[in-house]
Amino acid sequence: MALENLNNHLNFSGGPGALPEQVLKVTQAAIMNVPEVGLSVLGISHRSDWFRDVVDETENNLRELLGVPRDYHVLFLQGGSSLQFSMIPMNLLHGSKKTAEYIVSGYWSAKAVPEASIEGEVRVVWDGRDSGYNRLPAAEKLVLSSEAAYLHYVSNETVEGVQFSYLPGMSDVPLICDMASDFLSQPIAVDRYALVYAHAQKNLGPAGLTS
Ligand SMILES: Cc1ncc(COP(=O)(O)O)c(C=O)c1O
């Protein structure tokens, strides 16, 4: 199909976000041939210098847009945000004597809890289920431990549409945030977080990648 005829409507659903037509055109041409390499983009080694440059440029753009400090790593990982529900406790809770704290403010944060419970002790510090997840806790209502392994929350609950307007947690406990549906929608103070993650398919690109 010629992209000139594409009726690329704006997509206001939860995702995946519609890619700009210019991006689709460049992608279409690159599937046939990347001129400076002389190969289809699908046939270029993921270990090649050309692809390394693509990853480096993407990382630099992300660092610039979000003001990511130099002492923070930017990781591009396979899979979606749900995989992080497991990977985070596997890396930061498993084998620890500490308890991980979770704010359950909607459908997605509720899904993170059972995965973490496989790896260690979890304490739900607030749960909005009884009110149908139609509100968020006031900061002073959260009773938190300064000894927690980390505090996990979802900045914007995609299904219920509730979004935090403040950063929960204590400065001495690592703060972890699933920003899947509001990533890059506003500036964030990256240095207040230990870890921020978001799948690509809403605000960043097509599905299959999480940063
Ligand atoms: C806030 C949030 N977290 C996690 C997920 C799960 O993401 P994935 O489908 O990439 O596993 C979604 C999906 O829309 C989401 O909105």
Image (tube, grey):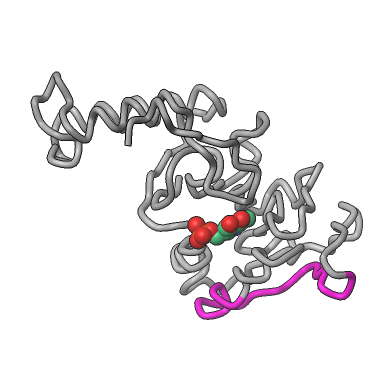
In the foreground, 72 or 14: 14
User: Magenta residues, as a range?
Assistant: 114-131
102 in the magenta segment:
no
Q: From the image, which quarter does the N terminus lie in?
A: top left
- Where does residue 81 sit, x and y in percent of width and height? 51, 57
In the displayed orientation, state which residue is furthest to the left.
38
Reply above or below: 155 against 114.
above
Q: Nearer the viewer, residue 151 or 133?
A: 133
Q: Of 140 and 160, which appears nearest the observer? A: 160
Q: Quadrant of residue 73?
A: top left
Q: Where's ligand 1: which quadrant?
A: bottom right
Quarter assignment of residue 165:
top right
Q: Quadrant of the C terminus?
A: top left
The location of residue 186, given as percent across then percent down, is 67, 31
Left or right: residue 92 versus residue 156 is: left
Answer left or right for 39 relative to 101: left
Observer able to see residue 81: no
Task: Give coordinates of residue 162: x percent, y percent.
Answer: 79, 53
Residue 121 included in the magenta stretch of the image: yes
